[in-house]
Image: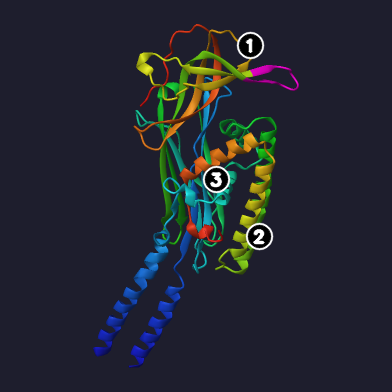
Amino acid sequence: MRKLKLLLAFLLVSASAFASMPGIAHYSFYSPNPVFDYTAYPTISLTASGTVQGYTTCNCPAGIYHQPQITLTLRNHATGAIVAGNKIAYGPQVPPSYNVNFTTSIGYDCSDCFTIFEMGLDSLEVVYCSMQGGPFAVYLFSMYVEAAQTMTIFTGTTSNCQTMPVTGLVTCAYSVNNWCTPMTTPPDLNMDGQEVRDTYPISASSNWLVGGACFRLASGTGWVCGHAVAVYYPGPQPKGNCTYNP
Amino acid sequence: MRVQHVWAACVAVLLTLNLPAMAQHQHPTQTETLIDGSHHPELISDTTAYRLFLATYAGTDDQHRKLQNVLFGAIGLLGQDRLVMTNALDDFNVRFKQMLEDDTKEVSVVPNTDHATFIIHRDAMMDNILASLKLQPSKVGFVHLDGYVQNEKKLMRISPELERRR
């Protein structure tokens, strides 16, 4: 009987102790669209990042630590080959209730970005728990990116001319349309009715090769692109091989 | 013999009671559903979106400066707007780091804190930075910046608990 009483006491104590142990993870994750640097165009630098913020509310035993870990992997979508990243970036090992703010980035410089076409970016963001011996807050995100280029032709419309304050250089916005071969139409980076900015004046027969970054969340769906660089070509130019990857 | 049976029964009850608790610790995220920005960007406040955005790109070393410059180009910021944005990133970086340090001190004193002080200060800081960003860049600059950040909400997964003050 005495043993039974002791056991019941143990049961009550341990149950209440465990009841206060559970914790709840409060983490937020962010895998931004990669940014493309065209400064050394046609070589392009791509930077992908990942961020984990948050904490765990718990009465966890002493000695337990949490650690944010981010793995960014860039693959050639066609071949599956890894072109950058695929290494775990480790954040600080902290007690679970500590506030974490961990960010990491990978870079990829490519002169062949326009031939790789589509790249898959996987972002695996986890918070590792030493008590569990594995990740317990997980965010896996995939997106597809490409560096696209589109040959364009000047439509004849000029607008929004500005004079630079120091140099006195005049730049204007020139309206353009796609100028792509039938095999590469419609281009992923659609420039129909868009504008490029360049110095003034230009010839009535002018072309620009426009480069930009495109994103999509699922392969086979439409691209969302932004144009970032326009290289002037005196016209008339033949229709160009534009990036076409539906 | 009877005592042994009772012992075994109690151990079984103990294990049954404890297992859910242990499982809850091991898989705590099961109790919290993240706000999925790809489906519900409208549920992510600007305060949160700008905080994650600024935290991702803030930094003063050469690598961060280069990345910021490229980012500003992607956003479409020109001239003075780039300087304003750089200052906003630097301001955020200093203030947010200080807040995290203050919060760490609090955790060392109150290990099971609910971080209420941190969250209040954090969101007040973000309100301040957002107000400044709405005023300082050119109107066109802020439209570009805000359009970029709103679009980035699709790539965020947010803990609703971290939004509880909003």
Q: Please tell me whether mark 1 sits on a helix, a strand or a loop.
A: loop
Quadrant containing the N terminus of chain B in the rendered view:
bottom left
Q: Residue at x 46, y 19 (%)?
A: A150
| Pointer 1 local density, CA inside 10 Å: few below 14, some 14–19, many at least 20 | few
Q: Which mark is residue A6?
A: none
Image x and y of residue B155, in percent? 47, 43
Q: Residue at x 61, y 17 (%)?
A: A198
The chain carrying label 3 is A
Q: Which residue is mark 3?
A: A103
Q: Which chain is mark 1 on? A: A
The residue identified by callout 2 is: B102
Q: Is residue A110 visible?
A: no
Protein chain holding label 2? B
Q: Disc 2 on helix, strand or loop?
A: helix
Res. A201 mark: 1
Q: Is residue B71 above or below residue B155?
A: above
Please report the bounds of the magenta region as a residue range: A160-171
Q: Amino acid at mark 3?
A: Thr
Q: Which quarter of the figure has residue A80?
A: top left
Q: Residue furthest right?
A: A166
The answer to whether marks 2 and 1 mark residues whose Cβ atoms lie closer than 8 Å is no
